[in-house]
Image (cartoon, helix red, strand yellow):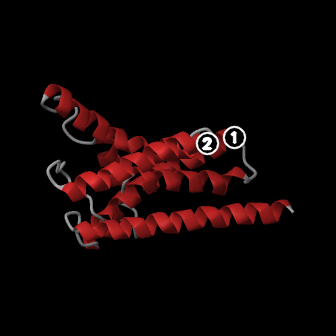
Amino acid sequence: MQGPTHILVGISLEKIFSKKRMQPVVRFVVIAVIALFLHSVFDRIARITYHPPDARYTDPFWVGYHLIVYTATIYMLVKYWRKYPIGITFSILPDFDWVILHGSKAILGEHPSWYQTGHIHQFLHTITDAVPPFSLLHQYLPDRTDDKLGFLWEVLIVISLILLIRWLDKRAVAKDK
């Protein structure tokens, strides 16, 4: 999944656990662990979304799509970071694999010898792939990462997460009355 999707998952988690009666340290750990796990789950679901593994700078659709994704990511970080730092941090933390891999490739011309693959993603996927029913996602979802219409699946997921967040907000207001 793309950054905005992961960020919305993190915001949702913080909203869900913000009113729960638990110690702040326990809340922090619960949000962090669930956010990391859900990052992996959503990355497995990403098989059905437009998610080419390589940059396609000559493809206007790829460039336009990623400009929208990067703009939305930056906007969401600026707008929501202060209010939901735990959920956002842990929901996008695994994507620092790609910052390291793509950044080193751009700067050095190659990946560092100590970081040839996304270690955080590999670790999380090992866990997710061992937990039924999530273990079935990677096996049975069709790989549509090169299908440009796959962006619609991501849009549908983003809309669903926004609706969840709005429902959580309404529910919180109703409880406060």
Give the Cα separation between the discs numbered 2 and 1. Answer: 6 Å
56 versus 100 height, above or below: below
Horizontal and vertical percent position of residue 77: 50, 42
Quadrant position of the N terminus in the picture: bottom left
Q: Residue at x 29, y 68 (%)?
A: 150
Q: Which residue is drawn at 72% across and 42% down?
A: 23
Horizontal and vertical percent position of residue 141: 28, 72
Q: Total marks drawn?
A: 2
| Disc 2 element | helix
The reply to whether the C-beta atoms of the residues labelled 2 and 1 are less than 8 Å apart is yes
Quadrant position of the C terminus in the picture: bottom right
What numbered label is drawn on residue 37?
A: none
What's the amino acid at mark 2?
A: Phe
Q: Mark 1 sits on what residue?
A: 24
Question: Viewer-proximal residue, 53 or 90?
Answer: 53
Q: Mark 2 sits on what residue?
A: 28
Residue 56 in the figure: left or right of residue 132: left
Q: Can you see residue 52?
A: no
Horizontal and vertical percent position of residue 67: 33, 49
164 versus 93 height, above or below: below
Question: Viewer-proximal residue, 74 or 100?
Answer: 74
Question: Viewer-proximal residue, 36 or 85?
Answer: 85
